[in-house]
Image: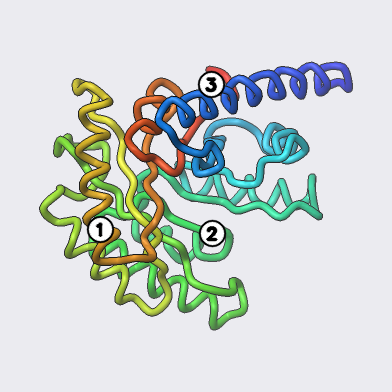
């Protein structure tokens, strides 16, 4: 990109970020909440590391990637573009167990854990990465919940959440931070997020450290915030469409 194109992209991202922050602020205040309670996770899948670098310049530090291979390459490129930046990468898409070892080297968290076998693989990988000096501290985890049981979208059924949360909580190299969901395609988002909020509260009672309730994306973040979301995952509204 030419310098003028870079500046044009920076300004576009600045405006989009301001719009998203304004939506979060308005939704939180309408719900009687402090906007500071709601984290913005920029989902940068399919977008280049140069865009992530511009978002870092604009003050963001949390980024979500769907695929391990793309995320690993982007994390390495960003380290060259912004070597002083302290960012945290989160995997938000479905993850194959054989990618766990590589992921443990660069990711701060996995927000899409939906099976005991995946939790066990991540625990082993994080332990091996710590032993090799490739990471310090546990791998942070959210249990992904499926509210409708739809195949292909990921998520553990509601009646299996407790067992999976216990499995993660007991793991030596994982930290159970909370739960995540995606609103079902054919459901009213507010109803889905109300159900999810009740489930999240129940998880918090048994696991006090599991404070994160990750729900809401570009099209439905207001409904998610109304029902207690502490993290909204925004891609399209921030970076645009391909």
Q: Residues within 10 Å of mark 3 (few under 14, many from 20)?
A: some
Task: Give how far apart the Cα atoms at labels 3 and 1 are.
Answer: 30 Å
Residue at 72%, 46% (x, y): give it.
Answer: 78
Q: Earlier in the sequence, mark 3 or mark 1?
A: 1
The label on residue 108 is 2
Q: Residues within 10 Å of mark 1 (few under 14, many from 20)?
A: many
Mark 3 lies on a secondary structure that is: helix
The answer to whether residue 224 is above or below residue 107 is above
Q: Residue furthest left?
A: 159
Identify the coloring.
rainbow
Q: Residue furthest bottom?
A: 131
The label on residue 237 is 3
Residue 112 location (% of width, % of height): 35, 50
Q: Quadrant of the C terminus?
A: top right
**Residue sitting nearer the eye, 76 or 58:** 58
Q: Quadrant of the N terminus?
A: top right
Q: Residue furthest front?
A: 32
Residue at 39%, 40% (x, y): give it.
Answer: 229
Indicate left or right for 36 with 5 as reference. Answer: left
Which residue carries the number 1 mark? Answer: 203
Residue 118 location (% of width, % of height): 30, 61
Mark 2 lies on a secondary structure that is: loop
The answer to whether residue 199 is above or below residue 165 is above
Q: Earlier in the sequence, mark 3 or mark 2?
A: 2
Residue at 80%, 53% (x, y): give it.
Answer: 83
**Residue sitting nearer the eye, 151 or 141:** 141
Task: Give how far apart the Cα atoms at labels 3 and 2 are.
Answer: 24 Å
Residue at 51%, 39% (x, y): give it.
Answer: 34
């Amino acid at each position: 990109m030419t310098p003028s194109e870079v500046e044009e992209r920076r300004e576009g991202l600045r405006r989009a970020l301001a719009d998203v922050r304004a939506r979060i602020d308005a939704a939180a205040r309408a719900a009687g909440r402090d906007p500071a309670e709601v984290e913005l996770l920029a989902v940068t899948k399919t977008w280049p590391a140069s865009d992530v670098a511009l978002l870092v310049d604009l003050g963001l530090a949390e980024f979500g990637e769907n695929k391990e291979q793309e995320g690993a390459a982007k994390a390495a490129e960003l380290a060259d573009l912004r070597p002083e930046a302290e960012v945290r990468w989160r995997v938000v898409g479905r993850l194959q167990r054989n990618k766990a070892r590589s992921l443990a080297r660069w990711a701060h968290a996995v927000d899409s854990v939906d099976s005991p076998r995946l939790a066990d693989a991540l625990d082993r990988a994080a332990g091996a990465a710590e032993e090799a000096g490739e990471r310090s501290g546990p791998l942070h985890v959210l249990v992904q919940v499926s509210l409708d049981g739809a195949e292909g979208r990921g998520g553990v059924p509601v009646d299996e959440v407790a067992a999976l949360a216990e499995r993660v909580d007991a793991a030596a190299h994982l930290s159970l931070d909370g739960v995540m969901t995606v609103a079902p395609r054919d459901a009213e988002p507010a109803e889905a997020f109300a159900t999810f909020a009740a489930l999240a509260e129940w998880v918090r009672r048994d696991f006090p450290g599991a404070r994160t309730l990750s729900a809401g994306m570009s099209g439905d973040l207001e409904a998610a915030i109304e029902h207690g979301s502490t993290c909204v995952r925004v891609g399209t509204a921030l970076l645009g469409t391909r």
